[in-house]
């Protein structure tokens, strides 16, 4: 279901991006940009809901060793560009390893 929802939202997002790039009317451009923000939020909500479904299903939950510090560094790396665009910096200093016995889905918790 996640895939089906994302396919449709991605089509809307793609066409909206095309309209934004070709629109000259400031008022219409403002509306399209609001639609763009809402579409991006919808994509995030779909991804978050899919992650929660995974977390709620504990049957067959596989655990493994995960370095939480490394995982946080990677998650932060995913947001550096967005933060830079908004004039923000993300700083995370980690010394050593922080190994936890967890399911790999935990990465999505930090990402979301």
Image (spheres, grey):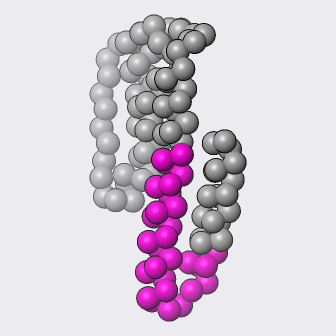
Name above or below for residue 91 compared with residue 70: below
Of residues 85 and 33, the one drawn nearer to the viewer in this rendering: 33
Magenta: main secondary structure equals helix
Q: Quadrant of the C terminus?
A: top left
Residue lying furthest bottom: 25
In the image: residue 61, left or right of residue 82? right
In the image: residue 89, left or right of residue 35? left
Indicate yes or no whether the magenta region holds residue 54: no
Name above or below for residue 70 compared with residue 97: below
- Residue 33: percent from left, percent from top: 47, 73
Residue 49 visible in the shown view: yes
- Residue 109: percent from left, percent from top: 43, 30
Name above or below for residue 23 compared with residue 85: below
What is the span of residues highlighted in magenta in the rendered image? 18-46
Q: Residue at x 59, y 72 (%)?
A: 16
Name above or below for residue 48 compared with residue 63: below
């Amino acid at each position: 279901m996640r895939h089906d929802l994302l396919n449709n939202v991605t089509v809307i997002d793609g066409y909206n991006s095309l309209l934004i790039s070709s629109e000259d009317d400031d008022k219409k451009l403002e509306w399209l940009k609001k639609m763009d923000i809402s579409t991006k939020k919808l994509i995030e909500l779909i991804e978050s809901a899919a992650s929660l479904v995974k977390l709620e299903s504990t049957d067959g939950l596989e655990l493994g060793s995960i370095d939480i510090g490394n995982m946080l560094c990677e998650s932060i790396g995913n947001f550096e560009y967005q933060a830079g665009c908004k004039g923000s910096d993300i700083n995370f200093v980690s010394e050593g390893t922080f190994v936890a016995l967890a399911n790999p889905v935990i990465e999505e918790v930090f990402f979301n």
